[in-house]
Image (tube, rainbow, N blue to C red):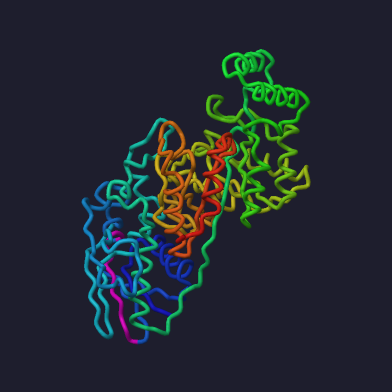
Amino acid sequence: MITIKCPHNCINERKYIFKVILWDFLGLEFTVIYESRSDIAILYENKTLKINDDFFTIADKKWMQLQSLPEQPLAHLDISGLSKTVDLPSTSLPIIYGKPNLEISENHIQLDIDIFGSSFFMLSRYEEAIKTDRDKHDRFPVTASLAYQEDFLARPIINEYLEILWFCLSTLSPKLRRKTRQYKELISCDVDTPYNPNSGFLKKELRQIASDLLKRKSLKLAWKRYRNFAAMRKGDYSLDPFYTFDWMMKSCEENNLKCAFYFLCDKTNLNYDGKYNIDESPITGLLQSISARGHEIGLHGSYNTYQTLSQHKFEFDKLQKITKREGINTINIGGRQHYLRYNIMKTPAILENSGMTYDSSLYYAEKPGFRCGICYEFTMYDLSSRSPLKLIQRPLIFMEASTLSGIYNDYNNTSHLAATLKNTCYKFNGTFTLLWHNSSLTTDVHKQIFIDILTQHPND
């Protein structure tokens, strides 16, 4: 067991981040001694690793104040001398808190990167509680983030800090053993529009069929549209172009993967929430199919649930009620917030108090990458009550809408961007989480990109 000596302030935050970094991530047992000092000392077998303690020292006096944010531009540590023992994406390591200094001697290491404070800053999303920047959906925008401004969004910076920390600890004591981790992939689908909401209306369908015949001169397309219309009138949505669930499940199964499908269970904004009801027969049939094939069912909290506990709990209970009625086991329910709406001071506690096991919302809609700076799942921290939560955050790494939609169009690079992030997660034995909407699989090209991402093996 290692011993940690640290200043006697920000106790809850220190307990949380020590547990996450040392036990959850590295699997190291430790004990903590709080005392009057200005740095952190890790002791093991009469050897010492001293680490800078800038963040908590500042935060103790200026909690949630602008003055507690990192000074920019960030300094960088040149780690080219460690390249033979520490494999990181770059030899230039951004320092969120602390100084770019690492000194190694036989029984003592001085590491001036504030690893624990910087990790807390990224995992808790501390900056989002201070900066007031928001987009039209009340989301913290990528451009306001330190990771974007300092150009490390595509790097899981906390994973890199972990490797530096482990290098220091294992240099002092080669006897130490870290937790063994395995790379994995998690696929998910936010069910916003399970079928085309414009399908099934006679006048609209007749106009579309006429356009297929007269403008597009395609009898095949007109016939396909008519068959879909006739089927939908009988309650069969399987021919609808948005109803790609069987294809998604089959594609995942062929690659030994499971898919989590997150369903909207109510409407809190008629402009942005789904046009379907969770208890209508086509959807309950879909729930049955997903469950029978061993895939996951979860909750997609509607547009305004991100800051309203009563509404989120209502939707959570409704999903449980429907699945129980259908004989589907959903003991551990996770999910994602609709439109990725998130208030870091409210939403995590709301999700936990609703009964959620995990959340996978922390991602920037505008750009793929590591919003939390990590490719591991981790327990969340409630900045409002200043206490740890049981809720697991499963950081989302890549969403197709960030590159394929008209707003963020980077169509040609979608597969490459996903492969690069996938390789990065693989390097750290982390988790690559992919979100792909069922309604974004209406063309053969989009389907092929999805397949390419699923079948691409890391480091190929």
Split into 4 quadrants, where in the image is the N terminus? bottom left
All told, the count of numbered labels is 0
**321, above or below 421, in the image:** above
In this rendered view, identify the residue nearer to me: 73 or 451.
451
Residue occupying the point 42% across, 57% down:
374
Q: Is residue 38 visible?
A: no
**392, above or below 106, in the image:** above
Q: Is residue 33 visible?
A: yes
Q: Is residue 106 left or right of residue 449?
A: left
Q: Quadrant of residue 263?
A: top right
In this rendered view, identify the residue nearer to me: 41 or 160.
160
Q: Quadrant of residue 159?
A: bottom left
Q: Quadrant of residue 275?
A: top right
Residue occupying the point 61% across, 55% down:
255
Q: Is residue 147 left or right of residue 253?
A: left
Residue range of the region highlighted in magenta in the rendering: 46-56
Residue occupying the point 26% across, 53% down:
70
Residue 94 at what x, y percent from top left? 27, 58
Residue 228 at what x, y percent from top left? 71, 26
Residue 410 at what x, y percent from top left? 40, 39
In this rendered view, identify the residue nearer to me: 134 or 261.
261
Q: Is residue 224 left or right of residue 401?
A: right
In this rendered view, identify the residue nearer to me: 211 or 163.
211
Magenta stretch holds residue 124: no
Residue 390 at what x, y percent from top left? 54, 57
